[in-house]
Amino acid sequence: MKKLMGEFKTFCAKGNIVELATGVMIGGAFGSIVTSLVNDLLMPLIGLATGGVNLSGLFIALDLQSYVSIEAAQAAGIGTLNYGAFLQAIINFLIIAFCVFMFVKAMTKITPKKAEAPKKAARLCPYCKMEIKDEAVKCPHCISDVSADAVKA
């Protein structure tokens, strides 16, 4: 048990785990902010633009009868397809996806770019001057012997 706890402590102390946990917590908080933005600001404006329709309350009763609300249909024991809530979830997702996209785009601009290691000069056949692989002992172009000993001679 002591060994297991030690391994768990080592696992949790790794930088990636701490960063991941921080990201999850911030993501959860951001998700609730976006949900509030959609539910409390955007959906009422969309409802106003559509003539007072409450999108989150749109549903289809599975018995194809008309009910005043989702709750009334469910109280009658009828299943419902709550497509208004689904539309709201799609709007939430699109806003979060756009914000993540903008964040990643901003981070790539401010993150310093890694310098690429300089490429090794291509090995050339001493006879035909064509490029050959480092491991080659014969040139595939002119069939000359290009082993290390032959090139030095």
Image (cartoon, rainbow, N blue to C red):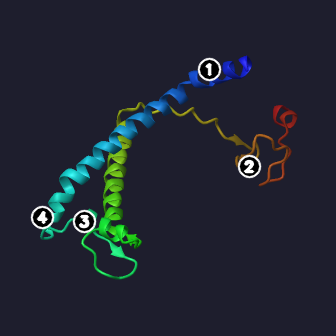
Separation (CA) of disc 4 from disc 1: 54 Å
- Give the mark, 4 or 1, whose residue is nearer the N terminus: 1
Q: Which residue is mark 1?
A: 9
Q: Nearer the viewer, residue 148 or 119?
A: 119
Q: Earlier in the sequence, mark 3 or mark 1?
A: 1
Disc 4 + disc 1, Cβ < 8 Å = no
Q: CA distance from mark 2 to mark 3?
A: 74 Å
Residue 52: percent from left, percent from top = 13, 67
Which image quarter is the N terminus in? top right
Label 2: few (<14), some (14–19) or many (≥20) C-alpha neighbours in 10 Å: few
Secondary element at tag 1: helix
Q: Please, what secondary structure does the residue beneath circle 2 have?
A: loop
Residue under the point 18% across and 52% down: 41
Q: Helix, strand, or loop for circle 3?
A: helix
In which quadrant will I find the C terminus? top right
Circle 4 residues within 10 Å: few <14, some 14–19, many ≥20: few
Residue designated by label 4: 48
Q: Which residue is mark 2?
A: 128
Query: Does 30 sit above or below residue 56?
Result: above
In which image quadrant can residue 2 be found? top right
Which amino acid does the dot numbered 4 rest on?
A: Leu
Image check: 36 left or right of 143?
A: left
